[in-house]
Image: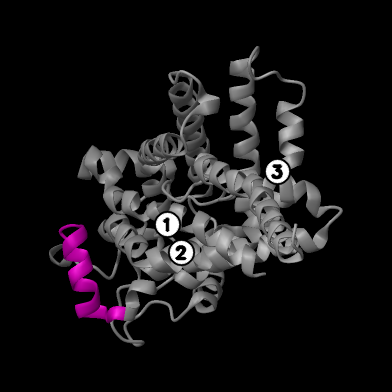
């Protein structure tokens, strides 16, 4: 055999080996994409859970002994989240305005938006095109402490509530433990990042055209003004109903997802697109189920800064009751369709995450 032929064979062998070696990574990537939405909260309006659960779980465990790997994952997740959140920020702002316009001091009854399209058309005309991104900085910044807190507390709560429980034999105990661990992790993260979520809502709801007519001039200004006028509690209005919303979302998600998977002939061999489709549908349904809680918490956030006589809702229960009595049940779902559209950001995050990680 000639030397040139040997070289060609060795070259082909090396490249084949590289391709074969890449197969597990490709399969893992597909698996992560199909299952990554299991904890994806992008459609629910809360956004307190890791977007790449499968990847993050492994990184979290490895992060203790391999900080470089954890920081790489952390940076990749942050960059991809920043890009995706910025891309869907206009939809998010429309959703928030439709949710809270009835309690906004800046929007008169005759000036309220008639729907999603009307809102999309009027915002650039009345406030300028860049106003679509009001509050987006707070939304992006919130990602980093949330991920760090998930890394710090996720495994502790899972061990506390799920240790020793067999999912197959003790389904309901496992289900309850999942809700408890998710609620505890969500509440813990909320304790630290809720002021950022509050600021994001108030900045997005600010419809002032110029600096003189705007209520807040940025993230820092919003937090400082709120703290001075209402103290620390003012930054945490709607906190309790936020935790309730997280639990409702998780209950709907895990209940529906597990049920849907059980109906398949063999879940382990389910095609990627089928799993992804199920995850998308379940995420959307779960987001709609928990959406009223998101509406109530946003309305409660809008109470901060009002004088005693101008307070519309005395507490969370009063908020639920008053919205239903004065606006009807449909008011709890205002902006819900925008929220469904915003869910496309979840798929964008998963794709960007892999691309950014490859560059780091």
Q: Which residue is painted at 77% across and 21% down in the image? A: 164
Colouring style: one colour
Dot 1 falls on a residue whose secondary structure is helix
- Residue range highlighted in magenta: 112-129
Q: Do the residues labelled 2 and 1 touch (CB within 8 Å)?
A: yes
Disc 2 to disc 1, how far (Cα)?
Answer: 7 Å
Dot 3 falls on a residue whose secondary structure is helix
Location of mark 2 (residue):
85
Where in the figure is residue 346, as x and y percent of width and height?
Answer: 46, 53
* Front in this rendered view, residue 79 or 327: 79
Q: Which residue is painted at 57% across and 45% down in the image? A: 32
Mark positioned earlier in the residue sequence (2 or 3): 2
Mark positioned earlier in the residue sequence (3 or 1): 3
Residue at the farthest right position: 65
**Which mark, residue 154?**
3
Of badges 3 and 1, the one in the foreground is 1
Disc 2 to disc 3, how far (Cα)?
Answer: 23 Å
**Which mark, residue 345?**
1
Crowding near the residue tagged with mark 3, few <14, some 14–19, many ≥20 C-alpha atoms within 10 Å: many
Relative vertical location of residue 302 with respect to residue 127 in this rendering, above or below:
above
Mark positioned earlier in the residue sequence (2 or 1): 2
């Amino acid at each position: 055999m000639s030397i040139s032929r040997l070289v060609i064979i060795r070259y082909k062998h090396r490249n084949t080996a590289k391709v074969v070696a890449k197969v597990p990574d490709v399969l893992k990537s597909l698996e992560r994409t199909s299952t990554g939405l299991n904890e994806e909260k992008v459609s629910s309006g809360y956004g307190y859970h890791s977007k790449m659960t499968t990847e993050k779980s492994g990184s979290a465990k490895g992060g203790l002994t391999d900080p470089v790997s954890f920081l790489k994952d952390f940076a990749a997740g942050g960059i991809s989240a920043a890009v995706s959140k910025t891309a869907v920020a206009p939809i998010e702002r429309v959703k928030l305005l439709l949710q809270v316009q009835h309690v906004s001091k800046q929007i008169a009854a005759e000036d309220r938006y008639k729907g999603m399209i009307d809102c999309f058309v009027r915002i650039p005309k009345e406030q300028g095109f860049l106003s679509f991104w009001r509050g987006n900085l707070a939304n992006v910044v919130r990602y980093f402490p949330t991920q760090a807190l998930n890394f710090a507390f996720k495994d502790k709560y899972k061990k506390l509530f799920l240790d020793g429980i067999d999912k197959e034999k003790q389904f309901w105990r496992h289900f309850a433990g999942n809700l408890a661990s998710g609620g505890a992790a969500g509440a813990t993260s909320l304790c630290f990042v809720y002021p950022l979520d509050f600021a994001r809502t108030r900045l997005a709801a600010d419809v002032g055209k110029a600096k003189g007519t705007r209520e807040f001039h940025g993230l820092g200004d919003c937090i400082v003004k709120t703290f001075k006028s209402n103290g620390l509690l003012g930054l945490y209005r709607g906190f309790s109903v936020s935790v309730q919303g997280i639990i409702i979302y998780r209950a709907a998600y895990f209940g529906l997802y597990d049920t849907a998977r059980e109906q398949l002939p063999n879940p382990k061999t389910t095609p990627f697109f089928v799993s992804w489709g199920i995850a998308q549908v379940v995420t959307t349904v779960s987001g709609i189920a928990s959406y009223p809680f998101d509406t109530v918490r946003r309305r409660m956030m809008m109470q901060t800064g009002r004088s005693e006589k101008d307070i519309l809702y005395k507490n969370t229960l009063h908020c639920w009751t008053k919205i239903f009595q004065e606006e009807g049940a449909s008011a709890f779902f205002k902006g819900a369709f925008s929220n469904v559209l915003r869910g496309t950001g979840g798929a964008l995050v998963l794709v960007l995450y892999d691309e950014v990680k490859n560059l780091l």
